[in-house]
Image (cartoon, coloured by chain):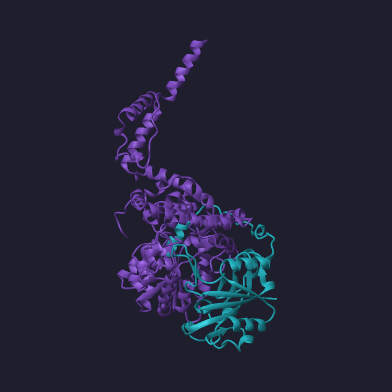
Amino acid sequence: MKENTIDHSTAAATFNKDVERVNWHDETLWFVRSKRDKSAHAIPEWETLRETASNIKFNVLSNMHHYLQEFEAKAKENGIIVHWAADGEEHNKIVHSIIAKHGVTQMVKSKSMLTEECHLNEYLADNGIEVIDSDLGEFIVQLRKEPPSHIVLPAIHLKKEDVSNTFNEHLGTEKGNNDPQYLTEAARKELRDTFLTRKVALTGVNFAVAETGEFVVCTNEGNADMGAHLADVHIACMGFEKLVPQRKHLGVFLRLLARSATGQPITTFSSHFKKPREGQEMHIVIVDNGRSTQLGREEFRNSLKCIRCGACMNTCPVYRRSGGHSYHNAVAGPIGSILAPNLNMKKNADLPFASTLCGSCTNVCPVKIDIHDQLYKWRQVLVKEGYTPTSKTVAMKGMSAVLANPTVFKIAGKAGRFVVKNMPFIVNNSMNVWYKQREMPAAPEESFREWYAKKQKESKDKK
Amino acid sequence: MSSRDSILNKIKNNQPSSVNELPDLSVLGLEKFDVIETYKTVLKGIGGFCEEVSSLDEVKAYIAAHYPTDKRMITTISELADIAETEWTNDDPHSLQNVELAVIKAHLGVAENSGLWVTDAILGQRVSPFITQYLAIIVNKNDIVPTMQQAYERISNLDYGFGTFIAGPSKTADIEQSLVLGAHGARGLTVFLMG
């Protein structure tokens, strides 16, 4: 894991240097958000679905201890080997030990944000295991040695010219051929060979059913299935919050997931894995990595309802104009900003501030997480725990001193008006971020209180 | 203490003290619409083709007219044995890499998203609908249900090792949101609506 992360606002400033690209990024994600709206509005009972999904998840969170044991017992009955990992490191060790046991040095992987969270690829590379990400977007960013910038659309920050250059360099595609059809075909050919030759395949998990011990993996490309059904060993990694109580509850979530994510009525493939195929070995790794701590934080517990659709990112005005990489966390955007401080308050103290608190995230969330409320609550926790920058604390303390005392407020107002009018250079300089890309209005001659006092006096004099 | 026990202990201590009730699902899936028409419209919208047929002979005629019959075709439907191989279900799954068309049946279809439910019992091999270049699935019109709500009511607690909903051809939009059909799975899907 990289230390010395660049904070969100600095990274966002860098991202915003290329105005044309930022505008394009903004519009592209808004386009996805619009598709979500169209799809959601076509379902008259959409709001009932959201409410139901939210309540199912509340039930799961309140009965997690029972459901996890039920799931484990059923999965074992089905012939699946179940592992438990307290943190990312243990998860990585478990995955590596399974690969090592089979004496192979290569693995194919479909999309799993959990393995990004645990930094599995780096761990395996350090241990001599080559991992190929098979989701097209993840394959692209992996070739470029970048992390995904979005949980559903990993390469959304890239233009087709970028992909063309990357493929030209790594796959030998024609230079300057930017046709997405041509580029996708090149990746299809390359990865088909990968699927056919790997003995071990790793997938994520979208939902796991306590009642039956099965798990569901959703993809549009079919890459999870190509990997899993051809490999001798299938490893599925899941955060424990992926559980749903019964199979019938899958219907509610599968109706919401793709519509919220991309506006599709459902992903192309919603695959239910219950038992290994004959001769195959199937593993499930159940991961905690801070989730049980979050479960105990009453105000933030709700964030564990997340089904990773990415709708909150697509709608977020800050995410759209700062890019996923500025969040320096496996899960970016509003939901990432309420999950990340739980993992590391110091490192992620900037993220709950990367929001306008406009509430759009909360409005589109398919499981009704109060995302913007939690962002606001995290700010308070982070200030109390002393994780915010001193400059901000000092400024806030100064502000509260001024606002709390009418005399000081009056003097400060006068001074402010004088400075803006007569010595604007004192405030209008590069030191003051409030003047960045902004013109300040002219200072009024008098404050409201002064004006009011004057008017009161005038009307008294008339009488 | 093992990681299992310590995780479970921590969860027990940290989860809410009382259990929230599960919601009633019977309030969902009550929307009324033309199931077959919706199915066809949604399938078209996500890049699939729909053919209404009344017999397997019509299926055969359609395949002969629309697919290169000199390439490898496989099926799990014994009545189609004269146009496609049927003796492949116990082979190494890797040997299916040169299949051009796989023809299989679905247990049921879902109108709201055009998904088709298939399981081990009718797939022949789990990888068959993914590894083939093109896919054709036959489903009875009577087996199309309105929403996922009814789909899971039908699936109920039936046992299977593997099952999947297939909705349209494999696709990606990972390059600048441009939709491309045929990512890693089948490049095209034809659904034969039988009845």
Residue B81 visible in rendering: yes
Q: Nearer the viewer, residue A215 or B174?
A: B174
Q: Is residue A402 above or below residue A61?
A: above
Q: Residue at x 60, y 84 (%)?
A: B64
* Chain displayed in cyan: B
The quarter of the rendered structure image containing the N terminus of chain A is bottom left
Residue that lies at the very extreme toward the front in this rendered image: A176
Image x and y of residue B136, in percent? 58, 78
Image x and y of residue A406, in percent? 40, 24
Image x and y of residue B5, in percent? 44, 63
Q: Is residue A230 above or below residue A286?
A: below
Q: Residue at x 38, y 62 (%)?
A: A118
Q: Nearer the viewer, residue A284 or A24?
A: A24
Query: Which image quadrant for residue A325?
Result: bottom left
Query: Which image quadrant for residue B85?
Result: bottom right
Which shade of the palette goes to chain A? purple
Q: Nearer the viewer, residue A172 or A376?
A: A172
Q: Residue at x 52, y 56 (%)?
A: A61
